[in-house]
Image (spheres, rainbow, N blue to C red):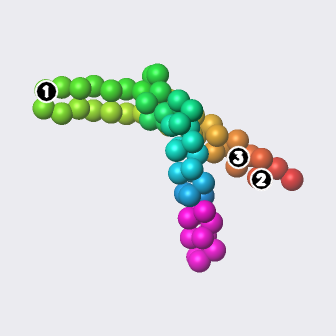
Amino acid sequence: MGRFLIIAGIFLIVAGFIVIAGDKVGIRLGRLPGDIRIQGKNGGFYFPIVTCIIISVVLSLIGWLVNRR
């Protein structure tokens, strides 16, 4: 369990650096074209569908590369 938590923490740190670096280059995860955003007078709804798809594809590719032997 401890090893898993350490690996998860390292992964979150790396993901944070990637998001910060992407923001500086102009790639804003969560604000991509195709993300659903509905704004009303009293509130809003936001669903980053394209961001979710991209993250899913990247994680699937990483999983496939790791499990390939």
Badge 2 marks a residue whose secondary structure is helix
Badge 1 marks a residue whose secondary structure is loop
Marked residue nearer the N-terminal end (1 or 3): 1
What is the CA distance from the residue labelled 2 to the residue labelled 1? Answer: 49 Å
Residue farthest to the top, as pictured: 33
Q: Answer with the quarter of the image where residue 14 lies.
A: bottom right
What is the CA distance from the residue labelled 1 to the residue labelled 3? Answer: 42 Å
Q: Nearer the viewer, mark 2 or mark 1?
A: 1
- The amino acid at mark 1 is Lys
Q: Is residue 33 above or below residue 2?
A: above
- Which label belongs to residue 26? none
What is the CA distance from the residue labelled 2 to the residue labelled 3? Answer: 9 Å
| Location of mark 2 (residue) | 67
Q: Residue at x 43, y 30 (%)?
A: 31
Q: Main secondary structure of the magenta part?
A: helix
Give, as a single range, the part of the protein colored magenta.
1-10
Number of other residues with Cα within 10 Å of mark 1, as a class: few under 14, some 14 to 19, many 20 or more: few
Q: Residue at x 49, y 33 (%)?
A: 28
Residue farthest to the bottom, as pictured: 2
Residue 22 picture location, percent across and down: 56, 37
Badge 3 marks a residue whose secondary structure is helix
Q: Is residue 53 above or below residue 8?
A: above
Q: Nearer the viewer, mark 2 or mark 3?
A: 3
| Location of mark 3 (residue) | 62
Number of other residues with Cα within 10 Å of mark 2, as a class: few under 14, some 14 to 19, many 20 or more: few
- Is there any visible trace of residue 28 in the rendered image? yes
| Figure disc tally | 3
| Location of mark 1 (residue) | 41
